[in-house]
Structure formats: structure tokens, C-alpha cells
Image (tube, grey):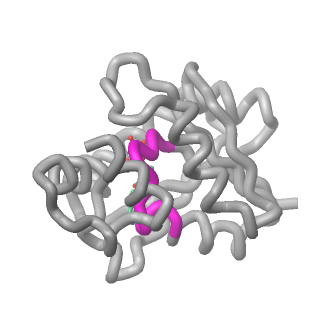
Amino acid sequence: MKRVIFPGSFDPPTLGHLNMIERASRIFDEVNIVLSVNVTKKPLFSPEERFKMLEELVVNMPNVKIHLWDKLIVDFAKKMDIKIMLRGVRALADFSYEFELAMTNKTLYPELDVIFLPTDPQYFVLRSSAIKEIAMHGGDISGMVPPNVAKAMKTRF
Ligand code: ADP
């Protein structure tokens, strides 16, 4: 049974995230989304709000599970005995950051294999931080996030 973790902050989940999750659910037997509760970042949505949004998005994907986690991601993987981590990469800039992160995680958990999946071209420019900025200034984000997220953002701003 191939089990994978897909960690992130998902603040908020975008169509790019959803595309990764859908593809991962076809490649792996079990996909574990690890919603990191990062105390150093000031998120737009609470961990519980993000959890609920993700839950709505994966309702038709029975092999996808969501977890809230406030410690090191590798510790989650160890606890669950999962040895594969999936990360999405968009531009080259993502790659250098992700590569360093993968090296660090490998040091912390030598049995871990990190797999990079390139974004599908139509999601190339989707980034949670930019989407928040656009929404904050009243821009149309309906083509960038799933409808439940667009609704939540409209309410928030
Ligand atoms: P983090 O803070 O851990 O980078 P994010 O929520 O920004 O969390 O991203 C979670 C994962 O989703 C990361 O692997 C990221 O590269 C991937 N991702 C985000 N947006 C896209 C996208 N548009 N296409 C492909 N992968 C993406």
C-alpha cells in the first residue's frame, strides 16, 4: 500500500492544491494532507476553517485524509510510518527552496523520500499569498480557487 503525505499551510486551498490532491489520489493508495498549524505565520483563515474547506474539497476522494499538525512534518510522517512526501513545484524558484527543504527533511528522517510533482500548466501562477492580495483589493479570484473558498474569502473581505 503506497501512502503519502502532502503537507502545506493551505491558506487558503487553491485550484493548484486541488489539482495536486486529485493527481496524488490517483497515484497513491492513501493521501494524507497535513495541514500545518504554523505558529510563526499569521494566517488569514484559522486551521479549523482551512480544515473544513479542504474537507469539502475531498468529499468525493475516499482515499484522501486530512490531519491538523503543529509539530515538524517529519515527525508526523514518522508517527504514521509514512515514508513518502509529495511536494508540488511551480517555477524554478520553488525548486531551489523545495530542494533545500527536502535535504533538511532527509537529514531529520533518512528513510523519507520526497517526490516533486510539477504543476499542471494552467495552475502555474496560483499562489495562496497572491490570491489573498488580489481578494483583499476586490479582484476576481473565482478562477483561482474552488467555489467554497471563493465564498469564504468574499465573506472575509
Ligand atoms: P507551504 O507553506 O508548505 O509551501 P502551501 O500551502 O503554500 O504550503 O503549499 C502546499 C503544497 O502545495 C506545496 O508542495 C506547494 O508547492 C504546492 N502547491 C501550491 N500551489 C501549487 C500550484 N499552483 N501547483 C502545484 N503545486 C502547488
Range covered by the magenta-colored residues: 8-18
- Residue at the (50%, 26%) spot, across then down: 37
Quadrant location of the C terminus in the rendered image: top left
Tell me if residue 71 comes above or below residue 4 in the rendering.
above
Q: Nearer the viewer, residue 135 or 82?
A: 135
Question: Looking at the picture, how far across and down is residue 134, in whole percent?
Answer: 16, 56
- Residue at the (61%, 27%) spot, across then down: 69
In this image, 15 relative to 81: left or right? left
Which residue occupies the extreme bottom position in the image? Answer: 121
The mark total stands at 0
| Displayed-image quarter of ligand 1 | bottom left
- Residue at the (73%, 30%) spot, across then down: 78
Question: Looking at the picture, how far across and down is residue 32, in whole percent?
Answer: 70, 48
- Residue at the (48%, 68%) spot, across then down: 117
> Which image quarter: residue 16?
bottom left
Is residue 10 found inside the magenta-colored segment of the image?
A: yes
Is residue 2 found inside the magenta-colored segment of the image?
A: no
Question: Looking at the picture, how far across and down is residue 96, in whole percent?
Answer: 27, 51
Q: Nearer the viewer, residue 1 or 63?
A: 63
Tell me if residue 148 comes above or below residue 39 in the rendering.
below
Question: Looking at the picture, how far across and down is residue 43, in whole percent?
Answer: 35, 31
Residue 84 shows in the view: no
In this image, 123 relative to 106: left or right? left
Quadrant location of the N terminus in the rendered image: bottom right
Which residue occupies the extreme left position in the image? Answer: 137
